[in-house]
Image (tube, grey):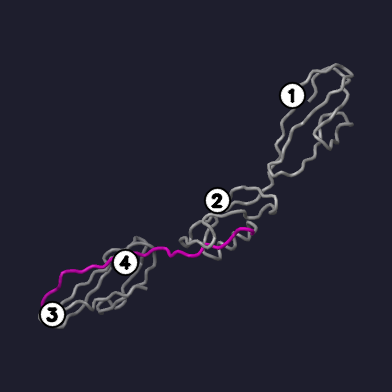
Amino acid sequence: MVVLDGSGSGDADGDAITYLWAITSSPAASKAVLTNPTSVNPSFVVDVVGTFVAELIVNDSHFNSAPSTVTITAQVPNVTVPNLVGLSQSAATSTLSASGFLLGSVSPGYNLTLAPGTVLSQSPAAVSQAPSGSSVNITVVVNLAPVVAAPAPQNIGINGCLSLLINASSPEGKPLTFALSNAPQACRSVATGRSCFPHRSAGRHL
């Protein structure tokens, strides 16, 4: 609530004065009204963010004074950003809502020690100050797919043995297992990145 103060007003002749306050400018969505606009200390409730202008005219029973104005700027208060690191995404969302924030962007990240779905980092940082109702962006741990390099095409004769060396890696540094498809049954289960199987017919094999 804003309390206005007209106690600094007076009349050069020492006559008693009366007060008349008015809100002359306010945000379009505001419905603010003055309480006791003819008192020395009227008040009003700021109902939206923005700029309000209040005007005071005093009268000594003979003349009105020139208007005197005061500008009041209402802003969204800053509040403390909660710590989200280590929480699940759903728990982080609930924590933000309870603290007056919104969930912003969610970016993928990876970590060898945190479980998938865990918040890895956030912006703004925890314990910093940010406007109530603003967004907090988070990075969440995800499982990243391994990267595999296809072996180069090879030419081999019938009954020859085709040896494949498959290069693959995990962006998370995890150990990998291998399995071949569209290959003879003997090669369907492969534990390493190298496989050899007999080639008994002409043509192209994938």
* 186 over 32 or under it: above or below: above
Magenta segment includes 85: yes
Q: Provide the residue designation for mark 1.
A: 152
Q: Provide the residue designation for mark 4.
A: 72
Pointer 1 local density, CA inside 10 Å: few below 14, some 14–19, many at least 20: few
In which quadrant is the C terminus drawn? top right
* 116 over 98 or under it: above or below: above
Q: Which is more N-terminal, label 2 or label 4?
A: 4
Please, what is the three-letter code of the amino acid marked with disc 1? Ala
Q: CA distance from mark 2 to mark 3?
A: 63 Å
Magenta segment includes 64: yes
User: Left or right: 32 with respect to 128?
Assistant: left
Are the residues at dot 2 and dot 1 in contact (C-beta closer than 8 Å)?
Answer: no
Q: CA distance from mark 1 to mark 4?
A: 73 Å
Q: Provide the residue designation for mark 2.
A: 105
Q: CA distance from mark 3 to mark 4?
A: 29 Å
Is the magenta region chiefly helix, strand or loop?
loop
Q: Bounds of the magenta span? A: 60-86
User: Mark 1 or mark 4, which is nearer to you?
Assistant: 1
Q: Secondary structure at mark 3?
A: loop
Pointer 3 local density, CA inside 10 Å: few below 14, some 14–19, many at least 20: few
